[in-house]
Amino acid sequence: MIYEGNEVLDYISDDGALFLISDEIDPEPSSITIKNFLRLKELNHEYVIFQQNVLMIEGYRIDVSLTKVFSTSDLYLQNFDESFYFKIKEFIKEKYSCELYPVSSRKVCDVLLKIEANNLLNPQKIKSLIGFGIGMTPSGDDFLVGLMASLKGSHYFNYFRKIIVKNLYRTNKVSGEFLRCASLGEFSATLAELIKAGNDHKPPEKYLYELFKKGHTSGIESLLGFLKGLEIRKTLL
């Protein structure tokens, strides 16, 4: 099944997902960058075949085995200093006061912001976040993707992973695949750059802004989750 976005085609099968993306945007987890993306979007997506690493869309052939699939399998947040945490916290606070930030979305984000780090360890709380909100990728799902990105490399990662994987049925197929990727340690290039900035003790502002621009509110919600993951690592490890 193909789900269409402005610059993304999501191919969902029983074996998982493959995200076909425009070269105008940063790579997503399990994604392949397509240069002639507009041509691909014009095809009839009712006729899709995926067999033996070959994806066929109305005669358009993509050999997945010959194409590099974006991966962050070897990347995780190894160490970060206090300034990294506080810069992210200050950035979120600043964007909250921005007039361009949708007021309706603040209500959902307020709920996410008020969650205490120790309460996030409650399995029922984690479960309640899956599918929470509206849109192709609900707010709670975006939050959990960011959370998993900052927890990868800590002993809490597997704890959250097991609960998330058991409850993917609570959200839609596309968002569920992003969560599944996150449970495998696979994240977008934008989140990957933020993790690298933390490891290298580089100013994160550039990468925070890039993440903030993603989607309607997906970026800020992922950032909220990333921040909460840092709080778990700071206070509970």
Image (cartoon, rainbow, N blue to C red):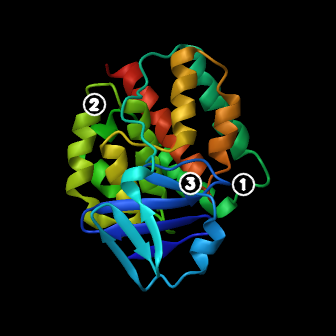
Residue 120 x %, y %: 33, 40
Residue 40 visible? The answer is yes
The relative height of residue 118 versus residue 35 in the rendered view (above or below) is above
Instruction: Say what amino acid the circle numbered 2 marks.
Output: Tyr
For label 3, the SS is helix
Instruction: Say what amino acid the circle numbered 1 marks.
Output: Tyr
Alpha-carbon distance for marks 2 and 3?
23 Å
Q: Which residue is mark 1?
A: 101
Q: Quadrant of the C terminus?
A: top left
In this view, which residue lies farthest toward the right? 99
Q: Which residue is mark 3?
A: 218
For label 1, the SS is loop
Residue 229 x %, y %: 42, 33
Count of residue discs = 3
Q: Quadrant of the N terminus?
A: bottom left
The relative height of residue 145 versus residue 200 in the rendered view (above or below) is below
Is residue 82 toward the left or the right of residue 161 in the image? right
Residue 132 visible? The answer is no
